[in-house]
Image (cartoon, grey):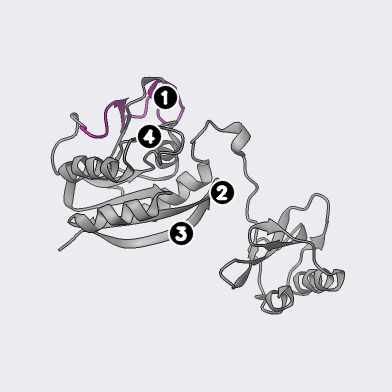
Amino acid sequence: SMVGAVGAEKKYYLINKGTFRVRFVQENQFAKVDKNIARRAEETVLNNSKLQIDRLSPGTEIWYSIRREGFAFCGQLLSKREFTEKNLNKGELRPEIAYLIACFADIKKEDVVLEPFCGYGSIPVQIAKKFQCARLFASDIDGEKIAMVSQKKQIKDNPCVDIRICDAMKLEHIEDNSIDAVITDPPWGFFEDIGNVADFYRNMFTSILRVLKTDGSVTILTARKEEFEGVVEELPLTISESLHTLVNGKKAGLYKLVRRN
């Protein structure tokens, strides 16, 4: 019940000044709860922070969320989205998700990085903006998207970035065993016709494994988790870390792969 979730509240908040409101979420939908429970939740925050209540336009929100899997958690909204789906192109990653993917990849400043399905440029823009790497290769088969990404201020005139039109299944401009980190969000096959998804992943990995250094890593976001994991089992790769999340309402997995010893 929501009462259990309220009782388990931690005694600190990352944003501890300004205003807040409490929201309740049941299986990903906002839920109405008994006024007494809502009041107890608000008092918990008031007693353990310097925040003040503003139910209309607060600076932060405290969410009590009950998941379908039967567990509950409490979280704090740290930032409001700059971009909603209305501001983005179909299939374009939100900037904060692209940033988290790059964090998950753990880029080193000496790394040569490749994003072979760069699309509208969410991932290369975040890497260029917030991370240091020796070289960043960004490419896509769609010339219109590449023209658009090339003009973005983080990419344009950036000597570290090599951006071009290229088929990810060939990567003719990339030498064998030259890439430290592949970080990518390949097509999921929902908006675009990629044929058989498993075959698409097999071809993609043949191309990636050619260019990847023996100690390199591959960080990939996919909503086709079963097909993806099935193909990875056939390959000389192992999943070193994974994180399961929702992207645009779809269950997705973020995977980090390394070569098998």
Marks 2 and 1, the one that precedes in the sequence: 1
Q: Amino acid at mark 2?
A: Gly
Amino acid at pointer 4:
Cys
Secondary structure at badge 1 equals helix
Q: CA distance from mark 4 to mark 3?
A: 21 Å
Looking at the picture, does residue 170 appear above or below residue 214? above
The magenta region covers 146-170
Q: Which residue is mark 2?
A: 249
Quick one: 28 or 122, which is closer to the camera? 28
Badge number at residue 118: 4
Mark 2, mark 1: which one is toward the viewer?
A: 2
Q: Marks 4 and 1: CB-CB under 8 Å? A: yes
Crowding around mark 3 (Cα neighbors within 10 Å: few <14, some 14 to 19, many 20+) is: some
Residue 188: image location, x then y, percent: 41, 41
Mark closer to the observer (4, 2)? 2
Residue located farthest toward the front when viewing the structure as drawn: 196
Point out the frontmost of discs 1 and 3. Answer: 3
**Which numbered disc, 2 or 3, marks the residue closer to the eye?**
2
Residue type indicated by callout 3: His
Q: Is residue 83 visible?
A: no
Q: Residue at x 68, y 75 (%)?
A: 5
Q: Position of residue 153 (x, y in %)?
A: 46, 27
Give the number of the disc on residue 244. Answer: 3
CA distance separating discs 2 and 1: 24 Å
Any part of residue 8 in sight: yes
